[in-house]
Amino acid sequence: MKDPEPSPQATGPLSGTSADLLVRAADGSDVVHVFGDLDIDSAQPLHSALREALDRSVDGLFLDLRGVEFCDCSGLGALLRIRHHALAQGKFIRLQGARPQVDRLLGATHTWPLFTATDHTRRLPGHQPMRDLRRSA
């Protein structure tokens, strides 16, 4: 008899990296609490773990970054790649709780708007997407 598989609702620490993840389901979407530094050492394992959580989610992921003290371009790249995967699946990635250093990075790179609620609101029932009012030449 096979041992039961672990619950898909929780992920343990990312072994050998400077980031830990805890995944908790919330209203059809997953809330992912991220702790540690998002840097070159943790970017690929972080992306892999987020990809697994995204694949299990119904609508997308809320990434709680209150536990992240540092994020470099590698960490930002992992966040942007997971957003790309989410959009390809018709899902969203929304960031919340960014500390000052991460907030500055997202502001300086003009990437904050990519992780706002607009990705989520397009999936609400009855929501009509905005039409492009520009005329073609």
Image (tube, rainbow, N blue to C red):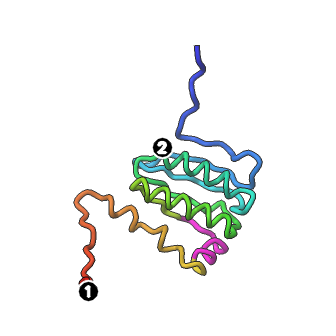
Contact between marks 2 and 1 (CB within 8 A): the answer is no
For label 2, the crowd category at 10 Å Cα-Cα, with few meaning under 14, some 14 to 19 and many 20 or more, is: some
Q: Secondary structure at mark 1?
A: loop
Query: Residue extending furthest front?
Result: 137
Q: Is residue 99 magenta?
A: yes
Q: In the rendered structure, which disc, 2 or 1, sits on the residue that comes first in sequence?
A: 2
Viewer-nearest residue: 84 or 68? 84
Q: Is residue 102 magenta?
A: yes
Query: Residue extending furthest bottom?
Result: 137
Q: Which residue is mark 2?
A: 56
- Pinpoint residue 99: horizontal percent, then vertical percent: 63, 70
Residue drawn at the location 62% of the way across and 56% of the way down? 34
Q: Say which amino acid is labelled 1.
A: Ala
Q: Quadrant of residue 6?
A: top right
Q: Say which amino acid is labelled 2.
A: Arg
Q: Is 49 on the left-hand or right-hand side of 88? A: right
Of the 4 image quadrants, the one containing the N terminus is top right
Q: Which residues, given as a range, are shown in magenta?
A: 96-106
Q: Which residue is mark 1?
A: 137
